[in-house]
Amino acid sequence: MSQSVTEVYWDALVHPIFQNRPLYLAATRQGLCLITQPHEPFETLQLWIGKKIPGAKLVHDPGRMAEYTHQLREYFDGNRTSFAFPFDLRGTAFQVSVWQTLTRIPYGHIQSYSEIAEAVGKPKAVRAVGAANGANPIPFVIPCHRVIGKSSALTGYRGGLQVKGELLRLEGFDEYTNKGHSRFQF
């Protein structure tokens, strides 16, 4: 009996907001499953796919990825406030519940880790929410950057606090901008 191989399509998105450093995007037939951060190399995508979708075949397919890259480009240009494509989330049940909760934080709004813990029905699991937030495989789209500390402080972000601050600035939160920097610094 032969087992079918899952194809995972990928493409790179280069945008001036990241000083033309590529983001690598991956999707299955079910939807978007991964976006790397601007400092992460292509190997990050390869390792994640190998761990989460063992035996998958990576296929560079800009055509299949066009809608994902188009909507992300619109977001980074300041012309999109939500995304309209499916996800293929690969994580524990708790992680997926956190990620789904994050998708309900509207553009231009923020919530604390404790508010997310309350929303997923685990009010004492603030650290676990933070860990799930950090493991978010689809940053920018699943807006983990909209989660801040209870004291309104910028805390933890896999892409770095400067990237998190810039994303919040893009969404109207000037108080989180690293003063003196209008774009990401790498």
Image: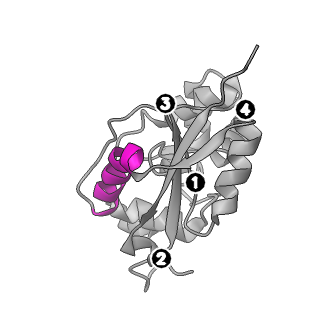
Task: Quadrant for residue 174, please give it.
Answer: bottom left
How packed mark 2 is, by other alpha carbons closer than 10 Å (few <14, some 14-19, many 20 or more), is some
- Residue under numbered circle 4: 125
* Helix, strand or loop at mark 4: loop
Residue shown at the point (71%, 27%) measured from the top left? 92
Answer above or below: position of 36 versus 1.
below
Judged from this view, the residue extending furthest toward the bottom is 180
Residue segment shown in magenta:
63-77
Which mark, residue 151?
A: 1
Answer above or below: position of 136 versus 88.
below
- Residue 43 at x, y = what percent? 69, 60
> Residues under labels 4 and 2: Cα distance?
32 Å
- Observer-side mark, 4 or 1, equals 4
- Residue under numbered circle 3: 29
How packed mark 3 is, by other alpha carbons closer than 10 Å (few <14, some 14-19, many 20 or more), is some
* Helix, strand or loop at mark 1: loop
Residue shown at the point (26%, 50%) measured from the top left? 80
